[in-house]
Amino acid sequence: MNSAFSNDVVVIGGGGHVGLPLAIALADRGSKVVVYDISASAVDIINSGRMPFSEPGAEPVLRRALDAGMLTASTDPSVVATAANVIVVIGTPVDEHLNPDPTAIPEALASCSRYFRDGQLLILRSTVYPGVTALVEKMVADLGVQADVAFCPERIAEHKAMEELYTLPQIVSSRSEDGRRRAAALFGTLTDEIVHLEPEEAELAKLFTNTWRYIKFAAANQFYMMANDRGLDFEKIRKGLTHNYPRAKDLPGPGFAAGPCLFKDTMQLAAFSDNTFNLGHSAMLVNEGLPLYLVSRLEKSYDLADMTVGILGMSFKAGSDDIRSSLSYKLRRVLKFKAKAVIGTDPHVSEEIDDTLLPLDAVLQKADLLIIATPHEEYRNLETSLPVADVWNLLGDGVRV
């Protein structure tokens, strides 16, 4: 530990899905860590040794770090002054016009900037709009603080954090040699492989990664619609064309492509390219249009106006309690215009998150038609005589609707 500081790391925004697993992992590998978050409830939960959200394998490591005195959580911004490394987990949002706000991170940091100190390393961790690292560098310089700035993007998938933080290569970028060295040393406590890029290269690398996944999902969803409109089973086609054929093995199945990153980051790239990113816009139209497509197809076979539709799964991905940007809610909005009634259920989403949800048994009793919106394992052995729209092929009966 740097003798000028009482902590090794403070994670700003450390109570969330990206910041908290990182804080826990760093503490478990020997860094003394403070989680700083404005959510008092999240901080209380963390200090009690519980996770405020679902992340497999994280809670035992959290309790171990707390018991060892290597991790604490606080709502006091002054803790920022206590750490040699300040890791910032604040994403760049997009507005109602799908334009990113590159000033969001500098403005959010302004509230605790008076606690920045000479000798600190400021590490941006969340996905940022290209050029935000440079804006933060300017902000720090304008404050008169002698601190290096690095951009080291997170690369984990939700629910795999406690595995991937230790196994995935970490991209490290900084304008200064000292910043690169210090960031590499910190993340080197987690993973053996460090990839060095320039800040602007790293910013685009992160956006390209998420956008590439989003485009692949859009291709699969478009293929599904083509096959489905001809009465053919896309999943059977996909299995046939990928069988022992390496050049097609990464073709995903169809389904809702959602969550807090993929759509947002694709739109950030679109803005960065002066809205000439036609492929990205097309992917957005396909993926965001899938709920409406499913409802339109169901209307051809069922009199929705006289039916209660049950939506199975409201989180954005299987096994998760995270509903951020979930297309299940878009599906529900569309169905409210078409169906007599719409009800939903999810085994992982708590009443505190969504108090409109019902137990699965109640949905099975009240619904006339079911849609599997999130492919939770709990639905794989579903026993019901009701018709089921299963775009994920979770039940193994094909994905035709």
Image (cartoon, helix red, strand yellow):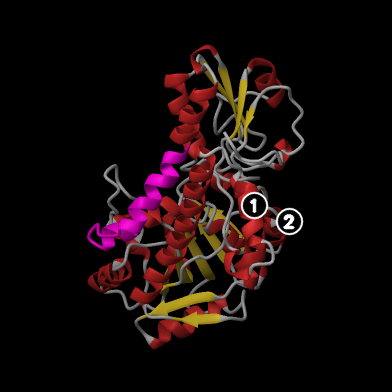
Mark 1: secondary structure:
loop
What range of the chain is rendered magenta? 269-290
Q: Position of residue 321 (x, y in %)?
A: 60, 42
Q: Is residue 178 left or right of residue 169?
A: left
Q: Is residue 300 visible?
A: yes
Quadrant that contains the C terminus? top right
Which residue type does callout 2 highlight?
Pro
Residue type, mark 1 in image: Glu
Q: Nearer the viewer, residue 119 or 224?
A: 224
Question: Where does label 1 land, which residue?
Answer: 55
Q: Is residue 1 magenta?
A: no
Q: Residue at x 31, y 66 (%)?
A: 132
Looking at the rendered image, the disc whose residue lies closer to the viewer, 1 or 2, is 1
Q: Residues within 10 Å of mark 2 (few under 14, many from 20)?
A: some
Residue 319 to residue 25: above or below: above
Q: Nearer the viewer, residue 2 or 152?
A: 152
Q: Is residue 123 above or below residue 367?
A: below
Q: Specify the principal SS of the magenta part.
A: helix
Instruction: Give the percent coordinates (x, y) of residue 211.
Output: 43, 60
- Residue at left offset 66%, top offset 72%: 29
Q: Nearer the viewer, residue 113 or 59?
A: 59
Query: Looking at this view, is 261 or 47 the one in front?
Result: 261
Name the image quarter holding residue 313. top right
User: Residue shown at 46%/51% (left/top)?
Assistant: 218
